[in-house]
Amino acid sequence: MRMSPLLLASLLALGAGPAQALDYVWLGGTGSWTDTSKWSLLGLPGSGDTASLNSGSAILDSDRLLGRLILAGGNRGGSGLLTSGALTFVSGSLFGPGATTITGAASFTGTNNQTVDATHTLNLNGGATWSVGNGTISTGTDARINVAAGTTFVDAGALSPSGSRSLGYYGNGSFNNAGSYERNGLGTTNAYGFNNSGRININSGTFLLRSAWSNTGIARIAAGANLASSEASFNNQGRLEGDGTVRTAGLNYALLNLGEIAPGTLSTVGHLAIDGDLTLGSGSVLDIDLASLSSFDSISISSDLRVAGVLKVESLDGFAPQVGDSFKIASFSQMIGGGSFSQVQWLGNPGLTLSIEYNASDITLRVAAVPEPSSWALMFSGLALFGWLSSRRRRMAEQ
């Protein structure tokens, strides 16, 4: 005997039937999520079940558990917390002051548009993929998308090298990455309200900041890839590393580094290019690794350089530079402001020291020997004798 959907739902509710997941479909229009007449099975989707919203708006003002949420043209609103094991976001929106938390995998269809709107919060706690396409993930007024620590958000890129997609477009919402954001594929991702406290790896293409960002984590730009900004204010408070290009809004705009710049990585050599001006702030650190006379970290700046902060230099893999060796670590159009590094940290042979040559269009490190203690003693003795003779001449002249 075949059971009707209503009878099956009743038996499941009473624990008398098989504990299998059910697929519920919202029947359209606007109504309460908890109105059983609005669902295809005349019940309420629960933990383990799938809820599909293909049209209309389901308003949830209480807390519910769900197995999978599918948005394919419909909308989920309200002030409640919906916790779902998975999310398939094809199109439609999440809106209202509530929150949607995804504990497992989430997917966004890259050829379509998805919206997190009107103060809503979407928590991605199990990782997410954004498939290839020129679509948009929008964050409206005070809306937030949060990528949890320990998870990965994969941006597969646009459809072509000239194509673009938008993240966090329109409104003043934010995309907050505490995990790992992987930018892959072709074209450009236009990012609005992007805040990184985790890690962003720009593996290919261009990641273009369309509004001021906050980076207190790590941003790695691979060779051939670009981190760019269209904003006059372009600051870094975390770590920038890699072998790609950081591009400012123009030749008269600067990247202000208040954190750390490490060409390559902290343990491998590389070359990082700055297309525009670079200002090394007083609290900044420039990390330079030396692996050999021909293999060492460097940065190139297409326009002006302002220097301050700490220069940290480390010798890698047992490399032992010799007195007189030199390394051009920075090239630029001109240095302005007459600044210099406030401190040089040499993490190599303690018997050697580094002199810094600030030239017209480059900064060069030169290796020198640390003076022997006897040399220091002779120098101080000479200075003392010179001081005594000067004082004696002054007294004789006064007599």
Image (cartoon, rainbow, N blue to C red):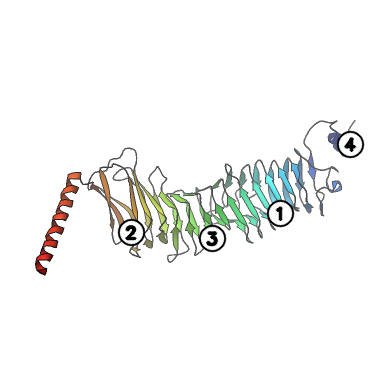
Q: Earlier in the sequence, mark 4 or mark 2?
A: 4
- Of labels 4 and 1, earlier in sequence is 4
Would you name the residue on which mark 3 appears? 212
Label 2 or label 1, whichever comes before in sequence order:
1
* Of the pair 40 and 396, the residue shown nearer to us: 396
Q: Residues within 10 Å of mark 3 (few under 14, many from 20)?
A: some
- In this picture, is 16 found above or below 351? above
Dot 1 crowding, Cα within 10 Å, few <14, some 14–19, many 20+: many
Three-letter code for the amino acid on which mark 1 is drawn: Ser
Q: What residue is pinned by disc 1?
A: 93
* Horizontal relation, residue 259 to residue 38: left or right: left
Q: Where is residue 375 in the image (x, y as percent from the top left)?
A: 17, 47
Task: Give the SS element for disc 4.
Answer: helix
The residue singled out by tag 4 in the image is 7
First reached walking from the N terminus: tag 3 or tag 4: 4
**The disc label shown at residue 340, or none:** 2
Q: How far apart are marks 2 and 3 (CA)?
A: 28 Å
Residue 257 x, y percent position in the rendering = 44, 57
**Cα distance, mark 4 to mark 2?**
80 Å
The quadrant in which residue 279 appears is bottom left
Q: Distance between the residues labelled 2 and 1?
A: 52 Å
* Label 3, label 1: how far apart the Cα atoms are: 25 Å
* Quadrant hosting residue 390: bottom left
The kind of residue tagged 3 is Ala
